[in-house]
Image: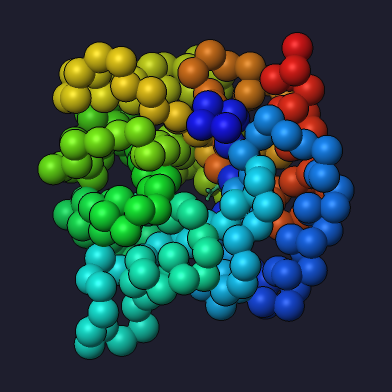
Amino acid sequence: MENNPIIAGNWKMNKTPSEGNAFISEIMDRLAEIKNINIILSPPFTGLYGPSLDYPFFKAAQNCHWEEKGAYTGEISVSMIKDCNAKFVIIGHSERRHVFGELDEHINLKVSAVMSGGLKPILCIGETLEQRQQNKTNSVIKSQIEKGLKGISSFENIVIAYEPVWAIGTGLTAEENQIYDAHERVRITMRELYGENLNIQVLYGGSVNSKNADSLIQISGVDGFLIGGASLDIESFTSIVKIVEKIQGK
Ligand code: PGA
């Protein structure tokens, strides 16, 4: 279970709770045969409450606050997410960073809070187009990991999602060598910072769909996907999971 590929659907601000519940039931029906892929569904907070899903399905929150409770209007704590029976929390998604001005310092506090609460963070990292054009991709990856994981000492529950900002929601998928290099860089950085033998799963995100999933999942170092747009459509999402399962079973 721990090293199964992960296919995570990030719904962003889409689907009401009733739409989301119906969608999840249908996904679980259609993918009832899947055993070796961890399938994570991430509705908005309003759709998160309910029983835990049966393995290999899991729920994730899209964000959290780092404080346990208090006067933080509009925020949601890790214990509230836990009470909804979610197991993962997406942290530092590029929309949080770039639309809502989230800083690495906030992301670090959130990762710590998620881990202390016994949930698993999916830490999102990735360069903007400008940073890539200026050859800063490696340094951005390093700095986002270093700052995001500052003070963290146990890594087995952390998932990293490499998502080049320019590929998110744009229909522009990164090229295979760019994805390979970035995933390699994530692992080199983790080794440099925290030592050998870390078993970290690294997902790719950015315009993954049912047409490119086959080739993307075969890139060495890609342990699964974080999917936005294509996760909202039942046909696309289920076909991506089936494609990954087929490749995995080879
Ligand atoms: P996309 O989004 O698949 O629509 O590009 C990916 C993400 O935001 O995680």
Question: Which residue is located at x 57 percent, y 74 percent?
Answer: 49
Question: Is 92 above or below relative to 140?
Answer: below
Residue 95: x percent and y percent?
A: 42, 58
Where is residue 31 shown, x and y percent of the image? Answer: 81, 44
Quarter of the picture holding the N terminus:
top right
Q: Is residue 191 above or below residue 235?
A: above
Q: Quadrant of residue 135?
A: top left
Q: Quadrant of the C terminus?
A: top right
Task: Name the one closer to the observer, 14 or 137.
Answer: 14
Q: How many marks?
A: 0
* Residue 179 spot, x, y in % from top left: 49, 23
Q: Is residue 244 above or below residue 106?
A: above
Q: Is residue 38 left or right of residue 3?
A: right
Camera-side residue: 22 or 181?
22
Which residue is pictured at 70% across the width and 69% down the height? 20
Position in image of residue 142 (x %, y %): 23, 30
Residue visible at 66% across and 43% down in the picture: 56
